[in-house]
Amino acid sequence: MSIRTSYFYDPDVGNFHYGAGHPMKPHRLSLTHSLVLHYGLYKKMMVFKPYKASQHDMCRFHSEDYIDFLQKVSPNNMQGFTKSLNTFNVGDDCPVFPGLFEFCSRYTGASLQGATQLNHKICDIAINWAGGLHHAKKFEASGFCYVNDIVISILELLKYHPRVLYIDIDIHHGDGVQEAFYLTDRVMTPVIKQVVDFYQPTCIVLQVSRRRRRRLSGAVGHCESIAVCLQCGADSLGCDRLGCFNLSIRGHGECVEFVKSFKIPLLVLGGGGYTVRNVARCWTYETSLLLEESISDELPYSGEKLYLLYTLKEISGSGAICWKYLEQIRQTVFENLKMLNHAPSVQIHDVPSDMLNYERTDDPDPDERGAEENYTRQEAANEFYDGDHDNDKESDVEI
């Protein structure tokens, strides 16, 4: 059975600009899409121009005051929002730039649409490289992130799945997601990050809240009942401008391939990544892995070929891996997993309505004629026919 993959890309999402000197470059999304096109990977997927998230969609997680501020503020009027800028942590790391709310609407809507398609079994894998902004909090921006599309998407997935597993291979801790679901046992957020992290100084092993330390026979449990959200931040690659990990593109891709092997509904999102050419190559390679398509290291001809340094070959960072240390981490993770509980039972209740509806609920247009098979011709009892239905028992009547 072939895997159905949906791919979401808005042609304008790569045109936004955080400002001169800022490490976050939405242009990386345009480069990634260009490679996806020129490798011909789009032919193997269902490609969608995504839905734009509304203020109401964003307020499923964020506060109304915060979203209202994002909608109103702009570089031209930000002087009148001095107090709000401080309150909502908008400034240096999270600057005000032209089209800020529009940018948030586009990447959030794509993630939300991907979650909805997984719920309705329209696809098995949904890809949105523009999403994955995992630092945004309920009341404020954080770490280049304004709206937490991951949390909003997981909330949508929880309408149809008892439990969601959130996996984050970004170099930085997905603190916004963990904080949002810290008090529920329906979302699992394993954390394995660098020792000194901007957003969580001591998160080197999988954390388990003490109040939830109970026994578990397996981390994934009953695969048919859960969904996975995979954040593929590419700042964990070697040679990243901000990250200091030593992952190669193929090593990063092995994480994606491993998660895909469980054949569970999978929402794949982007995230960090600040050496633009490496981000584009990495996410293109991972798109090919999700499609089970082999691609050449030699880049196809495109306008960005020189910019991307000719090949898709591996990045090599600096530093050695201590395998003994990694094995120690693995053992600690497994010990913590034994303390978790199975997916909780949920009381019977009405499932909330979907954020996006794929069923046509509007009444048909009375002025619009449908297909001919929808109409049955009414026959009067005294109609005259030739043949078997000839009421006057005559045939070949000449008039």
Image: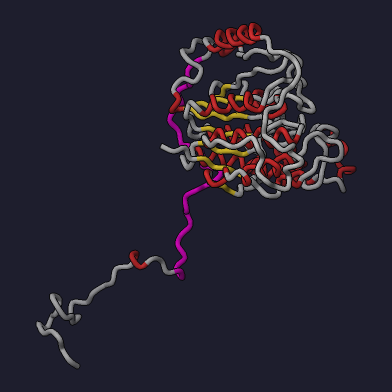
Q: Residue furthest bottom?
A: 399
Q: Is residue 61 visible?
A: no
Residue in view at x 53 percent, y 10 percent:
339
Q: What's drawn in magenta, residue-wise?
A: 341-368
Q: Nearer the viewer, residue 207 or 396?
A: 396
Q: Nearer the viewer, residue 302 or 286?
A: 302
Q: Nearer the viewer, residue 245 or 281?
A: 281
Above or below, comparing residue 60 to residue 191 in the picture? below
**Secondary structure character of the magenta stretch overall:** loop
Residue in view at x 55 percent, y 25 percent:
165
Residue in view at x 14 percent, y 80 percent:
390
- Quarter of the rendering containing residue 85: top right
Q: Does the magenta-highlighted stretch encompass residue 351?
A: yes
Please state the horizontal and vertical placement of residue 352, each as a whole percent of the image: 51, 38
Q: Does the magenta-highlighted stretch encompass residue 81?
A: no
Above or below, comparing residue 78 to residue 254 in the picture? below
Please state the horizontal and vertical placement of residue 151, each as a whole percent of the image: 62, 32
Along the horizontal axis of the image, is 277 left or right of 218?
right
Residue in view at x 52 percent, y 10 percent:
338
- Quarter of the rendering containing residue 330: top right
Q: Quadrant of the N terminus?
A: top left
Q: Residue furthest right?
A: 79
Q: Nearer the viewer, residue 111 or 312?
A: 312
